[in-house]
Amino acid sequence: METTKKYYRVDRKEISFLRFIFEAYDGIAVLETTDPKSGRVVFHISPGCEGDVEMILQDLKNDIMIEPASAI
């Protein structure tokens, strides 16, 4: 199965927190840090879980900086 990749820029101090949150959701997405200095991350989202990931990210945006980013 092919995952969906979505790129974001986040507050670099919150990368570990984001990873922890998505690990707790067991299998909906894997967070990969592409550039820790600038806070660039990519979510590898399991098929069918795109809506759930978007909902979680929208909720987290109330507390931390999360913005879409280009692939590279």
Image (cartoon, rainbow, N blue to C red):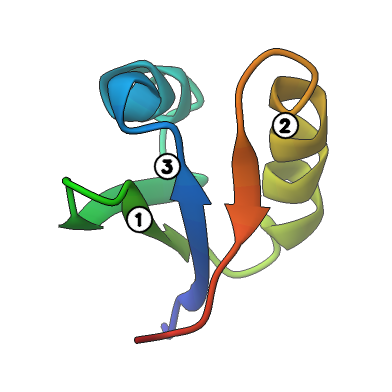
Is the C-beta separation of discs 1 and 2 under 8 Å? no
Nearer-the-camera pick, 57 or 36: 36
Q: Which residue has dot 2 on it?
A: 56
On the rendered structure, is 49 left or right of 62?
left
Q: Which callout, 1 or 3, points at the residue further toward the start of the chain?
A: 3
- Asked which secondary structure carries label 2, the reply is helix
Measure the alpha-carbon separation of dots 1 and 3: 17 Å
Identify the amino acid type marked 3: Gly
Q: Give the secondary structure at mark 3.
A: loop
Classify 71 as above or below 61: below
Tell me residue 48's x, y (percent). 70, 64
Horizontal arrangement in the rendering, residue 27 relative to residue 31 (left or right): right
Residue count near mark 3 (Cα–Cα under 10 Å), binned few <14, some 14–19, many ≥20: few
Label 2 CA crowd tier, 10 Å (few <14, some 14–19, many 20+): few
Q: Quadrant of the C terminus?
A: bottom left
Name which residue lies at 80% across and 18% down. Answer: 62
Whole-angstrom CA distance, mark 1 to mark 2, is: 15 Å
